[in-house]
Amino acid sequence: MSQLIENTQKSIEVTADDLPLHCPMPDMQKWNAHPRVFLPVAKTGEARCPYCGTLYTLKGGALAGGHH
């Protein structure tokens, strides 16, 4: 079992494997801290959660073409 991440971190780097990205992520301790919101990190390379303010950055930047 993977270790749970405390979702008090304000900046998290994610990979294409995490897409479609939503906050809170399933491996966070407080996965029900706020309503799940999907974030368009693939389009711009980064996205901020409107509920908790966590900044998600896509490793390698925005993806060109395709849907993830």
Image: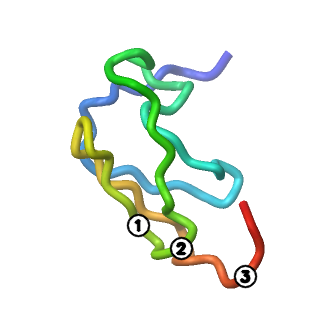
Q: Which residue is mark 1?
A: 46
What x and y, as percent, mark residue 13? 45, 56
Q: How many marks?
A: 3
The reply to whether discs 1 and 2 touch (Cβ–Cβ < 8 Å) is no
- Check disc 1: other Cα within 10 Å, few if <14, some if 14-19, many if 20+: some
Image coloring type: rainbow
Which mark is first along the chain, 3 or 1? Answer: 1
Residue designated by label 3: 65
Marks 3/2: CA–CA distance: 9 Å
Q: CA distance from mark 1 to mark 3?
A: 16 Å
Q: Is residue 68 left or right of residue 51?
A: right
Judging from the image, what secondary structure is the residue with disc 2 in? Answer: helix
Q: Amino acid at mark 3?
A: Gly
Q: Residue at x 55, y 77 (%)?
A: 62
- Left or right, 33 with respect to 31, comes to left
Q: Could you tell me residue 30's position as x and y percent?
A: 37, 16
Q: Amino acid at mark 2?
A: Lys
Per the image, the residue denoted by label 2 is 43
Q: Earlier in the sequence, mark 3 or mark 2?
A: 2
